[in-house]
Image (cartoon, grey):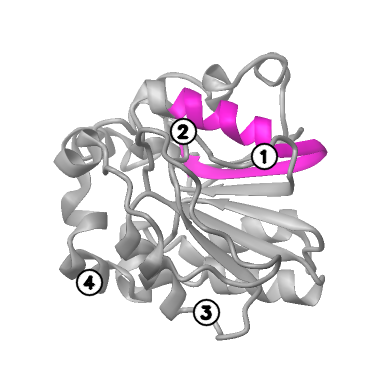
Amino acid sequence: MPTAAVRTPAPARTEAGSPVDSAKAPTLSIPRYLQRHYWWAYIHPNAIRFFDHDPIINFILWGNYAKLRNAALDELGETLPGQTLQVACAYGDLTPHLAERAAAGGGRLDVIDIVPAQLRNTRRKLKADAPVRLLNMDASDLNLADESYDRAIVYLLFHEQPDEYRERTLAEIFRVVKPGGTVVIIDFAQPEWWHPWRYWFKPLLAVLEPFALDLWKKPLTSWMPAPWSEREWPRRQYFGGYFQKLVITR
């Protein structure tokens, strides 16, 4: 889910560990590219109600939803002490799983998104006592302190961001994660040459996901700030290379 807007004062916070009511969070201006290209998938209330169901999500991800979710969770561990940042809401049960692991580790999960309706939808999936804050915030201009998170997860966001937002979002993530912290990214990639569906994925993405083909042309590290852009990071491919997992140590 893409997130970008003009910086505004940070949403009001409650005491550490308490959730923020996303319905009361300040509403930021939703960027034009998101309204133009993804209103049908992430903004309209009917879209949220339609897409956030396991069969639909699994269909969109070619049967790989559970595999990709578990691949991300496995990198983060069974318990999540300290502070965890999820950059943009995600359809499915990724966030409830993260919340359970944060609770098991005595930690807290912050989830940011530019669309208040996405935050409210996420709140409905969480237990009342989940150690989660939902923050109406711009991923490319985070109103968060430097080096304040132990880890961050970015799940299927970058293929839906234009170049400039993708670059700024990555810079912000590296700014707010502590040295030694982990950044886990799940996203699209160019399928292997032998993938039987590769040659009709491309025109399909060109219509539905106009920024996704960027990740076919260049590695994700191309948009990272130095020195992280200059290193090779553990990368695993799924579904014949159509999806990738990248694990970066801050």
Frontmost residue, 6 versus 95: 6
Look at discs 2 and 4 and give the one toward the viewer: 2
Indicate yes or no whether the magenta region holds residue 187: yes
**Picture quadrant of residue 185:** top right
**Image x and y of residue 210, in percent:** 24, 32
Indicate yes or no whether the magenta region holds residue 81: no
Residue annotated with mark 2: 140
Mark 2 and mark 4 lie on one chain; the one further toward the N terminus is 4
**Image x and y of residue 114, in percent:** 37, 49
Look at discs 1 and 4 and give the one toward the viewer: 1
Q: CA distance from mark 1 to mark 3?
A: 25 Å
The local crowd at label 1, few if under 14, some if 14 to 19, many if 20 or more residues have their Cα within 10 Å, is few
Res 230 seen here: yes
Q: Amino acid at mark 2?
A: Ser
**Image x and y of residue 174, in percent:** 66, 31
Q: Secondary structure at mark 4?
A: helix
Disc 1 to disc 3: CB gap under 8 Å: no
Residue annotated with mark 4: 50
Identify the magenta region: 166-189
Q: Amino acid at mark 4?
A: Phe
